[in-house]
Amino acid sequence: MSDLSFFEKVYAVVRQIPYGRVTSYRAIARYLGSEGSARMVGWAMNHSHTATLDVPAHRVVNRIGMLTGKHHFGGPHVMQQLLESEGIEIIDDQIVHFEEHFWDPAREL
């Protein structure tokens, strides 16, 4: 992965998030050895639609399970709908039982 750009490294991790699970910007940054770069992971997610391969960006949320990137999905409810289609309950832009759905790349990869 060393030859890849930071964004490409982020996308490679995000592509491995299992269906019905979510992770955080911070967890991805930590896994990539850039713990202070959670915002940069967010920028990568904002540009993920330009990636060559699909990136399930809807599975990346903030550290407490809020749908902070929802306005980048072409409509105010698209991110929520995508997560709900995977069996994740959302109330007021917050993932219900976030800990149960959380996928930590540092433990899983």
Image (cartoon, grey):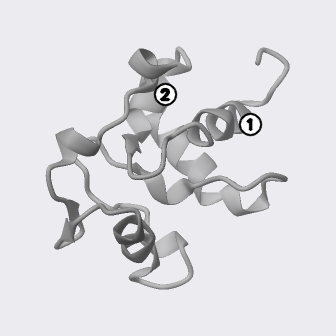
Identify the residue at horizontal 58%, vertical 55% (top origin). Answer: 56
Q: Quadrant of the N terminus?
A: top right
- Image mark count: 2
The foreground one among 105 and 85 is: 85
Looking at the picture, how far across and down is residue 78, in whole percent? 46, 79
Identify the residue at horizontal 45%, vertical 70% (top origin). Answer: 82
User: Callout 1: few (<14), some (14-19), or many (20+) C-alpha neighbours within 10 Å?
Assistant: some
Tell me the residue that label 2 is attached to: 29
Looking at the picture, how far across and down is residue 101, in whole percent? 28, 44
Identify the residue at horizontal 69%, vertical 39% (top origin). Answer: 7
Which is nearer the N-term, disc 1 or disc 2? Answer: 1
Name the image quarter holding residue 96: bottom left
- Three-letter residue code for mark 2: Ala
Q: CA distance from mark 1 to mark 2?
A: 13 Å
Name the image quarter holding residue 90: bottom left
Looking at the picture, how far across and down is residue 88, in whole percent? 29, 61
Name the image quarter holding residue 99: top left
The foreground one among 40 and 29 is: 29
- Three-letter residue code for mark 1: Glu
The foreground one among 89 and 9 is: 89
User: What secondary structure is found at the residue carrying circle 2?
Assistant: helix
Given contact means CB atoms under 8 Å apart, are the residues at marks 1 and 2 in contact? Answer: no
User: What secondary structure is found at the residue carrying circle 1?
Assistant: helix
User: Callout 2: few (<14), some (14-19), or many (20+) C-alpha neighbours within 10 Å?
Assistant: many
Compared across the picture, whether 90 is left or right of 41 comes to left
Identify the residue at horizontal 35%, vertical 61% (top origin). Answer: 68
Question: Compared to 85, does 6 lie above or below?
Answer: above
Looking at the picture, how far across and down is residue 65, in whole percent? 25, 51
Compared across the picture, whether 56 is left or right of 39 comes to right
Tell me the residue that label 1 is attached to: 8
Question: Compared to 60, does 103 lie above or below?
Answer: above
